[in-house]
Every structure is written in C-alpha cells, then in structure tokens.
Amino acid sequence: MKLLSINFVILWVIFFALYYLAPKKRQWMILAVASGLFYVVGTGGIPSGILLTGAGAYGCGIYLKRSLETQKEALSLLADKEKKKTLKQGFEKRRKRVQILYFVCSLGILALTKYMVVILPVLQGAGLTTPRSDAFFERVVMPLGVSFYTLTAIGYVVDVGREQCRAEENPAKLFLFLAYFPAITQGPFNRYVKLQGEFEREHVFDYERMLFGVQRFVWGAFKKLVIADRINLFVGNVFEGAGGIPGSIYALAVIFYMIQLYADFSGYMDMALGISETFDIFLPENFKRPYFSKSVAEFWRRWHITLGTWFKDYVMFSFVMSGTGRKIGKSAKKRWPKLGKHVTGIVGTMLVWLLTGMWHGRTVSYILWGIYYGVIMCVSLVLEPQYGIWKEKLSIKEGKLYSLFCMARTWVIVFVADVLIRSESLSQAGMIYRAILMDFRVREGILGVTSYGLSKYAFLLLAFSCLLWLAVSVWEEREKDVRRELAACPMAVRWCCYYGVALLLLITGIYGGSYDTAAFLYQSF
C-alpha cells in the first residue's frame, strides 16, 4: 500500500477515527492492527521477515533482561570482590555473545535480502527459478522495509543489553515498535525508549494538531509530486540517454538530482511525520535543511539524521569502546605520538562509511561513494586543528561571504558524490566527470535544455516551486515554526496559502501514465 494512494487515505481516516474512539489504554492496539494491515497489503502476503526479526529481537531482549536480573541476584550473595568481578565478567561475556549472534544473523539476512536483487537475475538467466519462485522471492525473501526494521531491531537489542531501555514482554507491542506504519518503509529510525513512551501515554483528539499533521502531509506530497517527480522527467532522460550530451546538461542533471533526492526523501518524511502527528505520536526529525551546511560533517548531521545517529551509537561507539578499538588506539599512540590519537576515530569512521555505502546500494559505486565520504571525514578530523591557524594566516574573517563559500564547497563535494550513485555504471560516471571537465559546451546546453523531457514552462513552474520551498526553508532555518506562524496570520491570508499549495499540488503534480508517483527513491536503498 502506497502513501500516495486512495486506499492508504481510506485506511488512515478509518483508523484515525477508531483510534480516538478507543479507550486510551487500548489505542496502541489500533495502531498495531493498522500497521499489520498496512504491511500485509504492502507485501501482498505473510509478513514473515518482520515476524522472524521481531521474534529474534523479542527472545534476545527477554534473555538479556533475565541475565541481568540473575546477575544482580548472584552478585548480592557474594562478598568477595574478585569472585564478584569474575562472575560479572562471565555474565557480560554471555550477553555479548548473544548480542553479537543476533547482530551477525540480522545483518547476514539483510545483506542476503538486499543483494538478492543482484542474485535473482542470475538465477533466472540460468533457468533455476520459476515464476512462482520469483514471486516467493519478491514477497518473502525481499520484504518491505527490511533495511529499516532490521536496524531498528538491532538497536533495540543493543539498548536492552546496555540497560538503556527495558525489555518488552508483550510481543505485540514490540511488533508495533518495529512495524509502525508511517515509518516502516523509509524510516525515520526510532529508538525503543522514545517511541514506546509515545505509544504508552494517553492521546486526546486535538483539532489543531490534526490540522498541522494534515498540512505537513500535504507539504510532503507537494515536494514529492510537484518538485521531485517533475525533476525526475529531466534527470531520467539525461542519465538514460546516449553519449555525446554536453557537460553543461550533465551538470544541470546532477544538480537537479541533488534537489530531487532531497525533495523526494524529505517529502516522504514530512508525510510520515504528518500522519503520525495526527495520531499524537511524534517521530524524530530526519532532516534539518542540509544544503545550508558549511561542511560535509554538518551536512551529514542534517541529512538522514536518524541513520547517522544509529551508525554513530551502534557501530562507531561499539568499535571505539571495544577491546580491538582500544588496542588499535594504544598501539597507534606509541608509534605516532601526534597523529596516533586520531587512528581509532579514522578506522571507526571508515568502517561506518563503508557500511553506509553498502546499506544504501548493491553496487561498487555505492561502496566507492561510502569510501569517498569516509576519506573526506577522516581528512577533516585530522586537519580540523589547523583550520583556525590557516584562517588567521590568510586573514579570513567569518561572515556571510565566507559562509556562502563554505556552503558552495559542501555542494561541490556532494555533487561529486551524487554523480556516482545516480550514474547507471562506473563507466558512465567517468564519462560524466570527463564531459563536465572537458566538454562543458554552455551554449549548446542552454539551447538544448528543453530536449530532455521538460518544456520551458515546466522549468518555470519548477523554479517557482523550488523558490517557495527555499522561502519556507529559510524561515525554518531562522527557527520559525512555519505552521504556527501561518496559523497566527489573518484567516484570508492563512487559507490562501493552504489552498494555494493544495491547488498547486493537484493541478501541477505528476500523476498517472507509466510513471509510478509513489516509487520513493529511498525505497531502493
């Protein structure tokens, strides 16, 4: 079931009504049923993947909880410090083994699932599959939202082991946490302690909150249908075209792709958070206007925020605090007294970005994309102390002009990376880099820009829509709550804005035909 469909809107309205009619202590059950129905309809079959992952997380959570309780009871009976230490270490080792086993099994299943897209065509070509087995692979082996619920489940197990949250004894509540329908396909990644707190508190209908939630959903649909899907018509034609395209057209297509990816993914987040807000459930923000960033590190603190914090907390932190990480750090400090302190951070950063690249895609391009960002992050980590010295020597003063320079520098770095992940192959990426650097042809690009799927009027509409989005983003960057600011405006102004965006969405959105309006880009990651 797609968020941008009549069926989903009907499900939303029905369960919204049931939710506020149900007793306050049973509202979570309505959400669980809605999530189950959404997932079953979305997969077209039994949600075996998420049930298996959830069962594993539930069993690990209960085991870790009982192990901690048993440890505390056993330690309370001992007086000898050495025996206590030995006993505690034994319990910790067993718990760590269970966590590592779940971590490895879950990531193994995730890797098999993601790379089945590559393996399946090979099997089909060899005649080893049938139409029935292909359908089985698509519905069972490659389930909806597997990348998101797998990492969410791993985070839950680790948090229970770290005693940062309690183990859930009700399997239905744990299923709701993993399968909560606004977040199941593309996130955001939720933490159990936060989301469970949202589910457990009482929820009372509030008209303003409902209105704000619907507004955010419409705004997300506007970014998706009016901006991202319109851009896709141009970007798709350029990247799927034959060679000989001017570098200027490629450069414009990559810039548009940067906007498309942001509009598409942040648009989904706006819809997901808006839907959830109508149920009085607040999900974490996943974007904070990344293209205002003045460095790559800041860009990734603002882009897909919950994925970044997941890797930081469960991969980077785990590595740095592990015995291996500490040994590497100590050895490096002995060999290189000045740079050794950065070695653990560099190794951890490269590990995080290698995994990030593999999580996002199944090709060598995505691995190179991850290594590219990892190297930039590591260089920044090592050179950061020098930045202040260099600015002082070059008499660079921080101000608006310097901020714009830093933002432009970040855009260029992201531009180079996005060529890799949007190109059909490494050879095409190399051709695009070469065309931009050696065959730019500005005049031919300007004259031929309307030959790739968008008319001049479509470009004007796109420019107007992006300027409207930019104005809202600037407003938000100044820490203004746009929805509350609009709510405080006179009624005529307020409803003109509401109807204006809604009409722009209905009249100019990309609908119908062979193009699937609901195929969000991040669903392929």
Image (cartoon, rainbow, N blue to C red):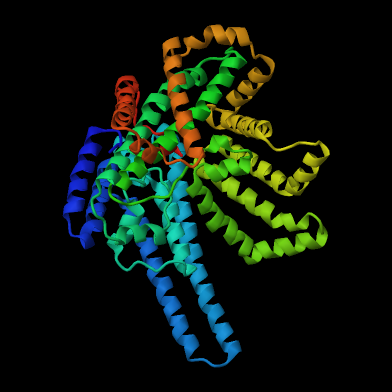
Q: Nearer the viewer, residue 341 or 63?
A: 341
Q: Is residue 104 above or below residue 480?
A: below
Q: Position of residue 289 (x, y in %)?
A: 51, 38
Res 123 seen here? no
- Could you tell me which residue is drawn at 64 percent across and 54 percent down? 348
- Does the image show residue 27? yes
Q: Quadrant of residue 136?
A: top left
Q: Residue furthest front?
A: 490
Q: Residue at x 80, y 44 (%)?
A: 389
Q: Position of residue 230 (x, y in %)?
A: 41, 22
Q: How many marks?
A: 0
Q: In front here: 291 or 307?
A: 291
Q: Residue at coordinates 78% horizontally, 61% vertically from top-left? A: 333
Q: Quadrant of the N terminus?
A: top left
Residue 424, image x and y in percent?
Answer: 52, 26
Residue 198: quarter of image: bottom left
Question: Percent from the top left, x then y, of residue 358?
Answer: 54, 43
Q: Nearer the viewer, residue 500 or 460?
A: 500
392 with respect to 445 (left or right): right
Left or right: residue 404 versus residue 15 is right
Pick whichever, 143 or 298, lies toward us. Answer: 298
Locate residue 6 relative to residue 256 in the image: left or right.
Answer: left
Q: Is residue 512 above or below residue 65?
A: above
